[in-house]
Image (cartoon, helix red, strand yellow):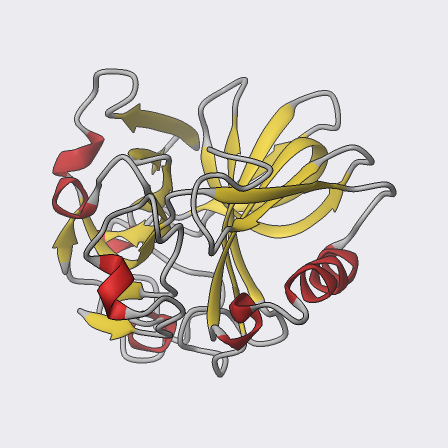
Amino acid sequence: MIRIASLLIPLALLTIGCASSAWDGTVDRWGTLRQVLRDGDVSGKVRLESVCTPFTHGIGALAGLEGEIAIQRGFPFVSRATSPDGSIARSSIASGTAAGDDEAAFLVVTEVYAWRETRSKHLLDESGLKAWIEIEISGTEVSFAPVVPVRVEGVMEWKGHVLAGHCPRSKQPLRPGTSQPIPAAGRPVNDTVLIGFFTTLPPGEISHHGTAFHLHALDLDTGVVAHVDEFTIGAGARLFLPAIEGPTSSSSQ
């Protein structure tokens, strides 16, 4: 495990509990995208259940690149592409299945005790979301954090994929028993939660080249979790960023 610590709250306050520290800037990571894609290290590094508390927020990929992970309010959701028909199997602790028993080859998590909410006034693509976040964190302690948890809820259109043992960006050859990712998408009529991180770290750590985000979509209609490749967020969607001063913030989980 690598701990990315951007200490936003004094240690003395952290001992008091979440009433004083909504988010302290600490992000834990197991593996990197570079390890998974360039080096081909897809081994299991951490069990999902071992990292989840009621306040955990995170995303990742299953061991063996067998599927996608999103952790929403402490509940791990997992989707697997099942061969050969291309269907997607879903599991989560929230639905009573054993997603917590799964291991991740790559996982990024943080603890957020309270969130601050704003609403979009216009349709937003990736560049629009980036600009929105940069405005919202400007002048706050969050702006110093190299990795910022992000959650977006609302009506949106997105395209992505669910891993089936091989990443499309990988330089590694297909291994026996694996296949290219299964396409996944969400229509504007569906409610979706985007879960993930905005980062200024170099590409290959948490984000792919060409993007400052690593986002997974949780389709609330189907329960499918997918890595997001592109998206358009509808007007009125809610953007959640971590609050610093405690759960008395204008929004909460």
Quarter of the rendering containing residue 107: bottom left
- At a point 25% along the width and 59% down the height, the residue shown is 14
Q: Quadrant of the N terminus?
A: bottom left
Can you give x and y, in whole percent of width and height, for residue 226 in the image?
48, 41
Can you give x and y, in whole percent of width and height, for residue 187 in the image?
71, 28
Locate residue 229 relative to residue 49 in the image: left or right: right
Can you give x and y, in whole percent of width and height, for residue 210 in the image?
63, 75
- At a point 49% along the width and 69% down the height, the residue shown is 207
Number of numbered discs overlaid on the protein picture: 0
User: Is 141 or 200 nearer to us in this picture?
Assistant: 141
- Whether residue 31 is visible, yes or no, is no
- At a point 31% along the width and 74% down the height, the residue shown is 5
Can you give x and y, in whole percent of width and height, for residue 72 in the image?
39, 36
Locate residue 248 relative to residue 13 in the image: left or right: right
On screen, residue 146 above or below 44: below
User: Is 160 or 154 nearer to us in this picture?
Assistant: 154
